[in-house]
Structure formats: C-alpha cells, structure tokens
Image: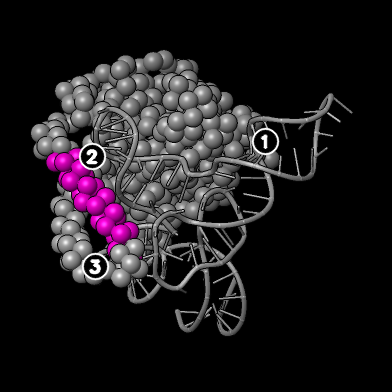
Amino acid sequence: MLDQVYIRKNPEEVREKLLRKGFDADFGPFLSDDQERRRLIAETEELKAERNRVSAEIPKLKKAGQDVSAEVERMRDVGDKIKSLDAELSAVNSRITKFLERLPNLPADDVVAGGKENNEVMYVWGEKPEFDFAPKHHVDLVTDLHMIDYERGAKLSGSGFWIYKGIGARLEWALINYFMDQHLADGYEMMLLPHVVNYDCGYTSGQFPKFEGDIFRVGDPSDTFRFLIPTAETALAGLYQNEILAEEDLPKKIFAYTPCFRREAGSHGAEERGMIRGHQFNKVEMFQYVVPADTEQALEELIEKAADLVRGLNLHFRVSKLAAEDCSASMEKTYDIEIWIPSMNIYKEVSSASSAGAYQARRGNVRYRNKETGKVEFVHTLNASGLATSRVMPAIVEQNQNADGSVTVPEVLRPYLGGLEVIRP
RNA sequence: GGAGAAGUACCCAAGUGGUUAAGGGGACGGUUUGCUAAACCGUUAGGCGUGAAAGCGUGCGAGGGUUCGAACCCCUCCUUCUCCGCCA
C-alpha cells in the first residue's frame, strides 16, 4: 500500500514511478474521492460533536425536571443525518481503499523501467561446467538414480507433484539442514510456521486481492478464508500486524523452513518439466524487519547470504538486479540469484532478495516507535529465499554429473549424508 | 463435533443505559537521601482521522443494530478458558 497523503501531494511523481513498473494509474477519481472524503469527515464530525453535547445536557435537564422532548426530537434528526453521511463516507472510503490496495509499490530510484530484458547482471560466479560426454537432463538423472518418483507423485496428487525417495529425500533434507545451519550461525531466529494462514496474511504480504487465484484455498467456502502458504513470506509478513514494536527490537532477522504451495495455473510445457515448477516445493526463507534507514544495507546482506549458500555448494550462478516490471508488485527492488541449468541452457531463479520498503508494513499496519522522536513509523520489510530446494537440486545433479551417470555430492552436504561422496545408480 | 464462561489500557481489575471508564500493581518523573530502599506527591489511552492551530471526532476483542445517548441491550464473527465427545 502506498501513502495516501503522499499521492495526494505528489500525484505526478507517483504516476511516473508506477509507469516504470508498467502500471498506468489514473489518479483523477482518487483525488476527487480523497477531497470528498475530507469534506464528509468535517461535516459528520461537527454533527457528532453537537450530538455529544446535547446528549450530555439531556440528563441534566431531566434531573431539573424539564421537558426534553424537543431536544430528543432534534437529535433524532441529527442522528439520521449522521447515519446517511456516514454511509456516504464509507462508500467513498471503500472506493479509495479498493484503488490503493491494487497499486503496486514504487520502484526504488536505482531500478530501471521495463521488463526482464532490462535486468542487469551484477556479477557471475564460477564457470559453466564443460562435459566431455553427453550430459543428461535432471529428470533423467534423478529418475535413473532413484532419487525422485514423478509418476507416483502424480498418482497421489496430480501433475506437478513428486516424491523424494531414498537418497533423493536425504539430499533434499541435507540441503534444508545446510541452509538452516548457515542462518543459525548468522544469528537469525528460526521459526516453524503454520502452513495454513488467513486472508489478512495474504493481504499484508501484498498477494491479495490481486492474486487470490494463485493459491490453494482450504476448507469449505463458507469457512473463514484460509489457504496454503505459497511462501513462508506470506506468514512472516503477517507476524506483527497491528503491533507497535520497540526500536530496540529491530532489526528482527528470521528464517523459516516451509513447504510452499502454488497453483501455477496454466501449463508450462516440456521446457519446465521436472522440479523447476511444481505445486509444492520446499524452501527456507529469510525475513527482516528493519528501521527505514537500514533497508538498503539489509537487502545487500540478504542477497549476499543467499549467494554464499550457492557458493558453498560450488554451483555456477549469477546475480541480477531486476528491472521494475520484473519485480513483484509489493517490491521496490529485487535481486535474483540465477543458477545455471545445463540442460535448459539457461540461468534459473533460485532466490529473490527483495525490499518491500513500507509497502507491506502499511498494508498490515506494522509499526515501531522511533526512539529519538517518540513518533510511530512504519517498519520496512525484506525477504529472501535461502534457498528454494526444487531449483537447487536440478542444478546440483546436472552441474555435478559424471560420465557414468553418477552425481558428485557437494562437499558441504556430505556431513548430512553420512559422508557420501558420489550418488550412484 | 456438543454444552458453557470470558475478552476493559503495560498487567490485574470495577463498571448492567446518562455529565469525567473506579481501584490496585508496574513503569516513569519529583520530594527526601552519603547510596539504595521505604514513604509521600505527581504522570501513565496510546494510536488513528481531521484541522494552520486550538480543538473536534474515534477508541472497552472485531463488525453491524437498537437508542437523543451504548463498555453496558440485540445480532454476526474472532480468540481464550472449562466440561463432554473424538483422536495422532
């Protein structure tokens, strides 16, 4: 959510920034609603003040034995008037909210306009592996090595679901443990969250109302709206809704392991077969609540922490700064870590580190008290995957494959696998 | 799943239709003091909206309703607790 007052005062600047994100906003109706809203507030409050005044008089007059029927009659009319003005006001308010809640965040000043084609590669780490044999696709590798069972996954749950089994399951779990151990060493607080959350969490994180179709809703439609989290971020952004934190409590650095559930409506074709895009995948997520002045530094910390995880695995990757339209709606700035997938001849996102600025905090009313000024301000939120395993495992097996169809286990994972060095059929 | 009870500020808690939402604890400030404690005095409803400001409005879990007037009466929902049932 953007600041209503800021838009009122700088509509042209906001419009220009939103255009960079590919969002063409017409502020005309909003600005007149905004003005109408303040007019209605002034009018109703004057009437309410009068009603309060007279209603306080009535018992005094009664006690003095006077007839109050004239006052009561007059206040009845005032009450009716208030009721109809309040109805007008709430109609205006809901128009304003509906407009505001659909506006994406403003891009940061150093984020360029345009889509993917304008993403900027910040640096490349490592080199593409050279094979003196015909390298296999990760789906063939994990199937031949009995690490993943796609067919039975689909049998249980439909396409887009798979089963990790045997050494595949252990490798998946090793990755999660490796990530978590790094975050613990960096002093992040570990959380295990509910995997089902309510509507407010989706709203705060910026997912709703726009992307309600992308999630798995649970329970009967008549039940309270609840859904399976598409990412731990959805729950983590909702943690402190409607709270005022002490500045001493910031920054809050948190990580959580959760499965993630996404509908991914529409088919993605053979190009993305395998573990690249599924309805359920595992992810360890980092999240920070910070004071506004620390946002930029926190974002650098998050992207480098995520990059360190990939370096630790010794996998070839690059880091890109996304152009405005490629950032998700809630974010002002995003860096992606893209890992090399040899079979696809492409760099594929394994982590996004993003700053939401005050966008999520305003939606969820998450604030802190500024120690110096004593004033209450919105916190800033940031998140980064660290990492999504379903994109990492294909890179591991493809980049580390050997001529005999075996896969060399990255050194950092071996302690989690009883010292196993090579996965063989 | 069934039955019942509750939700008031940092905490405990009184308040069952009327002017200003008791009281206590804690915290903070002060008096006193070599220092600490005690005692005593004082402050402790913030936030939000509106406004140039003074002010005004709003706030008793949330949202509606009744009323000239609602913490209080009515409806819906959320959360917590107790008992019963079921269960890893």
Dot 3 falls on which chain? Answer: A
Residue A211: x and y in percent read 27, 46
Residue sitting at x 33%, y 67%: A64
Label 1 sits on a secondary structure element that is helix
Res A68 label? 3
Magenta-drawn stretch contains A51: yes
What is the span of residues highlighted in magenta in the rendered image? A36-59
Question: Is residue A235 visible to us here?
Answer: yes
Residues at marks 1 and 3, CA–CA distance in whole angstroms:
85 Å
Q: Which residue is mark 2?
A: A100
Question: Is residue A231 visible to us here?
Answer: no
Q: Earlier in the sequence, mark 1 or mark 3?
A: 3
Residue B33: x and y in percent read 82, 28
Res A415 label? 1
Say what amino acid the circle numbered 3 marks: Val
Tell which of A120 and A161 is nearer to you.
A120
Say what amino acid the circle numbered 2 marks: Leu
Pointer 2 with pointer 1, Cβ within 8 A: no
Q: Earlier in the sequence, mark 2 or mark 1?
A: 2
